[in-house]
Amino acid sequence: MDKKQKMSLWALSSVPLVMTLGNSMLIPVLPKIEKQLDITGFKVSMIITVYSIFAILLIPIAGYLSDKWGRKKVIIPSLLIAGLGGVLTGWASWKMENPFLWIIIGRIIQGIGSAGAMPVVIPCVGDMFKDEKEVSCGLGLVETSNTFGKVLSPILGSVLASIVWFLPFFAIPILCAIAIIFISIFVKQPKQKKKQEVKSVKKFVRSIRKILKRNGRWLYTIFILGAIIMFILFGMLFYLSSILENRYQIHGVMKGLVLAIPLAALSFTSYVTGKKIGDQKTIMKRCIYIGFIIVSLSFLIPLFSKNIYLLILNLILCGIGIGLSLPSLDSLVTEGIEKEERGTITSLYSSLRFVGVAGGPPAFAYLMKGPDNYMMILSLILGAVGAFISIKYINPKDEDQNLSPQKQVKHR
């Protein structure tokens, strides 16, 4: 990996960092927003959910456009749109007496922007390198940047909200502007494909059907696993953010620091895993199912004790399990698909991850009306289901058979 590639990779890694901060930074602030606007827990969870719903709908389109026009031409406008959404949410919160509707509209605009940002970065990293070990290492760095954003976000969100409750909204356009500058300077646009090589929408849909028919068994499994991971992660963060204030009287920056502990475990594990897995698909599979087993078992702890320290231990173990799984899922879905179709397929994967992000907070908000054990049992079952389907349906030998002849030679 030369110096230019390293700079490009660091610049690309700023995108998941920014997009994660733009969403996760609001999680510790949600109880404060709920009180400030006098709305229900379910309503406040919609601030996270609507962002994710619109990302889900538009990510596949962004993936197609990135295959057609080029990654950089999609990423930069998307960051600009996300920044404008942040300006609207911040302005409405500052100037309006009842800003909830405009906050939701601003978050929808942010979700539209996010669809063409983080999901397009994954295939962009795949395009940068020919060596699959470097691809895995690069994706590990991107996933680490994503998870580091999750570590930083509760702290930064809590600090900003302690000054003014809506200040985190205004941080989003500033962060987007920084990412735009980095991408513009350090990421070079690859040569555009010849016009006749660009697929029409009809051919594009047909090619997707072919890919899913050929690779559906393991691709659908990875899509489901990505959704499960994000559902558990964002659901538990929403739950923890609420109970730290309401049950344990931990507020402000201290709450942000507590939320950051399990996310730091996730970030560190993700970084190490990305560096170690290389191009070994068998090791990737092992990391995925072991990660899900750890996630599932971690939720046994709070079934027997509600001690805050044991709850944090549970989430640290959960973070380690997720950190083992995520880089391996990213690498499998990127390296197992030809470069020409990579943007679209990884976008479908990112879209399913956003399904988990969208579903976690409102589902946990609803379950929080009953005993805590309901959430723990659900997470335990989902983790066990993830382990089972990864063992049964991800078969690296089958994936290699579906690669092009050149890639098959490389793997032998």
Image: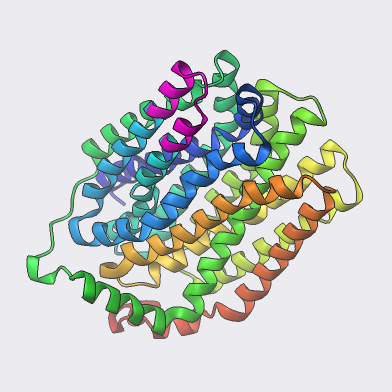
Task: Check the image and tell me how it is coloured.
Answer: rainbow
Give the quadrant of residue 182.
top left
For the view shown, which residue lies furthest in the right direction? Answer: 304
Give the quadrant of residue 130.
bottom left
For the view shown, which residue lies furthest in the left direction? Answer: 195
Picture layout, residue 380 above or below residue 3? below
Rendered location of residue 56, percent (x, y): 44, 55
Q: Residue at x 45, y 58 (%)?
A: 351
For the view shown, which residue lies furthest in the top direction? Answer: 163
Q: Nearer the viewer, residue 271 or 259?
A: 259
Q: Residue at x 54, y 46 (%)?
A: 49
Quadrant containing the C terminus is bottom left
Rendered location of residue 102, percent (x, y): 44, 31
Q: Does the magenta portion include 104?
A: yes
Q: Is residue 158 left or right of residue 372?
A: left
Q: Is residue 337 left or right of residue 67?
A: right
Q: Residue at x 40, y 84 (%)?
A: 214
Picture layout, residue 26 above or below residue 62? above
Q: Residue at x 65, y 68 (%)?
A: 386
Q: How many marks?
A: 0
Magenta residues, start to end: 88-105
Rendered location of residue 96, percent (x, y): 46, 19
Task: Identify the main secondary structure in magenta.
Answer: helix
Q: Does the magenta portion include 335?
A: no
Q: Is residue 251 left or right of residue 62?
A: right
Q: Nearer the viewer, residue 47 or 18?
A: 47
Rendered location of residue 197, percent (x, y): 13, 71
Tell me if I can see residue 412 in this picture.
no
Tell me if I can see residue 387 in this picture.
yes
Give the quadrant of residue 212.
bottom left
